[in-house]
Amino acid sequence: MRTLPGLASLLCLLSACGNDAAEADKSAASATPRQVTYAECMAAADRQPSRAETVARAAECMRLPDAPPPGSTLPPGTPPPPVGAFADADTGAISSVYTSLSEEDCRMTSMDEESGSSSSRCPGTAGYALNAHDGDARISIDVVAPDGKVHELNYWGVITHNFSSPGPRAEWRMRGGRPIALIVRVNASEDPVDSSRLTSYLAVAKITPRQACVTDRIAPSPTANEQARAAADRSAGRPCLTEVPQG
């Protein structure tokens, strides 16, 4: 049986229009920008050339849909642990808890008006806190244990001798409910020609019942975060750095 010419043309036209519509929908979908995640936004904030720009960018990240609620120290998307989950603090998987190092969230404890040096107490986790020091435009951090003992990490002696500033947050590596290591980004001004050009290191410090000290200085690379976490998770058996590594 022959198909009427008019009907065949109509069917062909409808088929073509359907394909065009599908292609148009596909193009529209591909043109829609992907939503940046909180983790991606914070990583970009860490790479800003100045502390002020880093803090401003981090504040924008807090408005993203997957950002942690205000005051939370849990990574985005992580539900609070159930009661009794940390009964055995020395077993279980290692995870991360984040706390702020921004000026807005830290309380100044001392200030030298003549030199401009200052110290601040910043929040921690599991009974720990951090002392952030800024002296001669160089930063360092102390880990304050729950018993009040202060462990100096000496960033200006083992990470960089140059002008430096911290990233917007600290990452605590946790086994159960106990911190086993601390990771902090240290932005160093090491270019003698352009002081605004920063080199971003990750300072890895072990935390044991007896001491806390820097064990690794992770240089910038696309996998620096992964390297820092791997170093942090095995840091308990590593020696403390005593000087800025060469090379």
Image: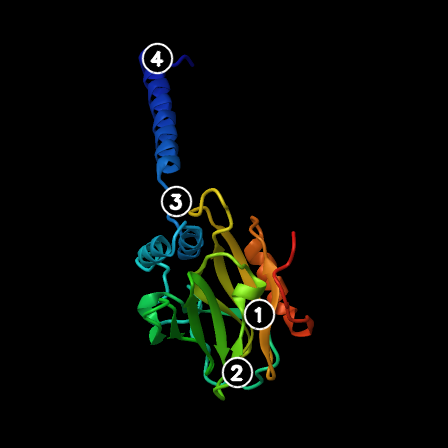
Q: In the rendered image, is residue 20 in sight? A: yes
Q: In the rendered image, is residue 70 in sight? A: no
What residue sits right under mark 3 in the picture? 34
Q: Which mark is residue 205?
A: 1
Amino acid at dot 4? Leu
- Count neighbours of disc 1 (C-alpha within 10 A) and say few if under 14, some if 14 to 19, many if 20 or more: many
N-terminal of the pair, mark 1 or mark 4, is 4
Q: Answer yes or no: do the residues labelled 4 and 2 have beta carbons within 8 Å?
A: no
Question: Which quadrant of the structure image shows residue 71?
Answer: bottom left
Amino acid at dot 3? Arg
**Residue 165 horizontal side relative to residue 243, left or right:** left
Question: Which quadrant of the structure image shows residue 232?
Answer: bottom right
N-terminal of the pair, mark 1 or mark 2, is 2
Secondary structure type for disc 2? loop
Q: Is residue 20 above or below residue 228?
A: above
Depth check, mark 4 against mark 2: the one in front is: 2
Q: Which mark is residue 16?
A: none
- Count neighbours of disc 2 (C-alpha within 10 A) and say few if under 14, some if 14 to 19, many if 20 or more: some
Amino acid at dot 2? Phe
Q: Which sits in the foreground, 35 or 128?
A: 128
From the top left corner, tell me how far across and down residue 128 is, in percent: 47, 80
Gap between marks 3 and 2 measured at Cα:
37 Å
Q: Which sits in the foreground, 22 or 214?
A: 214
Gap between marks 1 and 4 measured at Cα:
81 Å
Gap between marks 3 and 4 measured at Cα:
48 Å
